[in-house]
Every structure is written in structure tokens, then in C-alpha cells.
């Protein structure tokens, strides 16, 4: 199935389409031509550290950052071969 068909299918289901991994102007243009509703990727913004995210996204929107405690995932049991 082509990208255009997937986007058309999503829109037919009244879903919004996000093109992820956009790293070049050419990819941005292609996403727009194919009908993506939103794009995400390094072309628009590099990965932000959490404090940068707070300053650029949350604070200008008048939101207060919420910090959850980090919880380590339990170790998976080793499988015997």
C-alpha cells in the first residue's frame, strides 16, 4: 500500500495524519503534497532536553511542568539456551 493510500485511508476514517522523521525540505514538501496534517522531525526541531522543552513549549503556553518520579523497569529474566 502506498503512503498516499494510507493517508487517504486515515482521512477517510476521520483521523489526523502525522508524518514522523522529517529530516529534509524535500521530505517536508512530500508530506505536505501527500496530505499529512502534521509533521515531526529534526528538520523542524532537534530533540529537546526536558528543561528546553519546558522553556519552549510549556511555559509560553502557561503550563506548569509536572515531574513524575523515575521508576526503573524490572529486569527481564534471562532465557536459557
Image: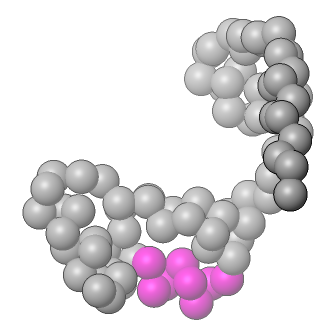
**Residue furthest to the left:** 12
Horizontal placement of 13 versus 31: left or right? left
The magenta-colored residue range is 24-31
**Residue at 28%, 72% in the rendered image:** 7
- In the displayed image of the protein, which residue is found farthest to the front? 81
Q: In this view, does 12 lie to the left or right of 70?
A: left
Residue at point 63% right, 14% down? 63
**Residue 6 showing in the rendered view:** yes
State whether residue 15 is above or below residue 2: above
> Image check: 46 left or right of 18?
right
Q: Is residue 52 left or right of residue 15?
A: right
The quarter of the picture where the N terminus appears is bottom left
Q: In which quarter of the image is the C terminus?
A: bottom right
How many numbered circles are shown?
0
Q: Which residue is drawn at 15% across and 52% down?
A: 14
Q: Where is residue 75 in the image (x, y as percent from the top left)?
A: 87, 30
Whether the magenta-drawn stretch holds residue 47 is answered as no
Task: Tell me if residue 68 comes above or below residue 30 in the rendering.
Answer: above
Colour mapping used in the image: one colour
- The spot of residue 31 in percent (x, y) is 44, 78
Q: In the rendered image, which quarter is residue 49 located in?
A: top right
Helix, strand or loop for the magenta stretch, by majority: helix
Tell me where residue 35 sits by quadrant.
Answer: bottom left
User: Where's residue 30, x and y in %?
Assistant: 45, 86
Which residue is drawn at the image coordinates 36% and 68% (left, top)?
A: 36
Q: Which of 26 and 16 is in front in this view?
A: 16
Location of residue 7 with respect to 4 vertically, above or below: above
Residue 55 seen in the current view: no
Amino acid at each position: 500500500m502506498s503512503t498516499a493510500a494510507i493517508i487517504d485511508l486515515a482521512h477517510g476514517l476521520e483521523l489526523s495524519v502525522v508524518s514522523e522523521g522529517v529530516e529534509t525540505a524535500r521530505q517536508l514538501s512530500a508530506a505536505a503534497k501527500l496530505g499529512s496534517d502534521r509533521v515531526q522531525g529534526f528538520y523542524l526541531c532537534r530533540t529537546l532536553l526536558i528543561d528546553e522543552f519546558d522553556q519552549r513549549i510549556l511555559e509560553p503556553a502557561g503550563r506548569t511542568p509536572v515531574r513524575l518520579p523515575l521508576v526503573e523497569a524490572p529486569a527481564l529474566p534471562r532465557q536459557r539456551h
